[in-house]
Amino acid sequence: MFQALTPLPPDPILGLSIAFKADTNPNKIDLGIGVYKDVNGNTPVMRAVKKAEDRILKSQTTKSYVGPVGAADYNERVAHMILGEELYNSLGQRRVTVQTPGGTGGLRLAAEFIHKANAGATVWVSDPTWANHIPLISAAGLNVEKYPYYDYASHNVRFAEMLTCLQQAPKGDLVLLHGCCHNPSGADLNQEQWQAVRDLAREKGFTVFIDLAYQGLGNGMEEDAYGVRLLAESLPELIVVSSCSKNFGLYRERTGAVTLICDTAESTAAATTLIAAAARANYSMPPDHGAAIVQLIMDDPDLQAEWDMELTDMRDRINGLRSLLVERIKAAGIDKDFSFIEREKGMFSFLGVNLEQIQTLIKDYGIYLVNSSRINVASINDNNIDYLTSSLAKVLSS
Ligand code: LMR
């Protein structure tokens, strides 16, 4: 039966990493996959994470199973992190957090949970959105529709068009929003826009589903949770999928969570059984190591302070690189206005070059970026920025 299989094209993001590794160009730059890199181009293990791992290694007494919803203490720390102290307390039994294998595992689990709650649901996703959103939501059997989001010409959110489109989303449908650091555009909703989405959700009755993969990488841990918290305090239901891949640098440890807010304690209890059953039927239970690290860091004031400082350094570096890139692009003699990169947030922005120019950057210069022209700003450093901007200048002028 396997002889009839047709191979699939490479993954639009992960496929780039493979091609990058195989490239022998000594100047090559990987602007593809969203991982943080330091001034030397490395993705180091955070110091607080190393210390927590060391303690876990010494003190762990069992590798016994944890259960489909993961570690209860980790789940509480994550709920606290995304909701903040006040809402964490006030939502009481209307909230539940379930540990998942990374943010992607959380999205898939949430999609399966939605399918159980309403098999005919449509999930409305931003146009554009993360390259894996549509495949994974569709794989769970849900319908997907797009709403307008990013204007490639003005580099702004097409907010009026987005709201008009979402008028069509009825009760029973889901609207997927990026909590912060929109992937791939870096263009986020401002506070008034979050409030308008909240008002529309109230009026239409659709359920908001937030992907919060980059909390702390935009403006700060608290600031980046503005939308999540606004909606959590004012809507009867909310789904939030969060990830510790980026803000704790735990990428390969697969450390994420789904947080559900339901209208009553009874529906929360019922939802918990459904989501636990979905986890059990998929992977039985999530991996433990990353969650144990996060839990330990959040429980220890010294480790938490150290982690917070490291995260602040990462965020400041990314924001600094955004300004530096705009400045160096100008200095390289490029006329086109790239100042939007400085206004956008998180790891990503679109470079706004066309497919042919992207192919030239990859093939002739070893500069790897996603086909949409998404670049990972965090991959830029003092050693590669001149090569990047001079190559871009050549490609844009040819
Ligand atoms: C990205 O968007 O590059 C990251 O979220 C990594 C991934 O899994 O695609």
Image (tube, helix red, strand yellow):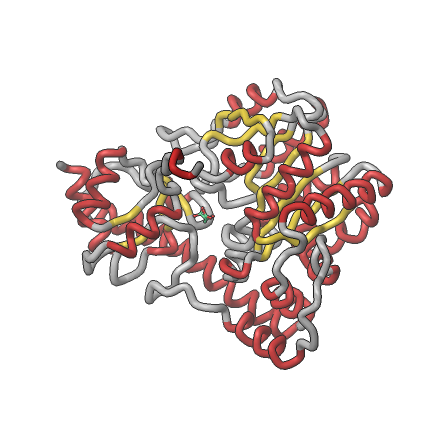
Could you tell me which residue is drawn at 20 percent across and 54 percent down? Answer: 387
Q: Is residue 28 above or below residue 396?
A: below
Expressed as whole percent of the image width and height from the top left, the position of residue 270 reads 81, 41
Which residue extends farthest front? 1
Q: Is residue 338 above or below residue 222?
A: above
Residue 187 vertical position relative to residue 300 in the rendered view, above or below: above
x and y, in percent, of residue 314 in the image? 46, 61
Q: How many marks?
A: 0
> Relative to the observer, which residue lies in front, 205 or 220?
205
The N terminus sits in image quarter: top left
Furthest toward the left, the residue is 398
Mark yes or no: residue 225 visible. no
* Residue that lies at the very extreme toward the right in this rendered image: 266
- What residue sits 63% from the left and 63% below the top? 288
- Work out whether 303 lies above or below 119: below
Image quarter of residue 128: top left
- The image quadrant of residue 177 is top right
Q: Position of residue 322 (x, y in %)?
A: 37, 50
The residue at 54%/31% (across/down) is 125
Front-most of 124 and 281? 281
Image x and y of residue 269, in percent: 82, 44
Residue 253 is at least partly visible in this image: yes
* Relative side of 78 to 2, left or right: right
Q: Quadrant of the C terminus?
A: top left
Q: Residue at x 50, y 61 (%)?
A: 249
Residue 205 sits in which quadrant?
A: top right
Q: Image check: 212 left or right of 98? A: left
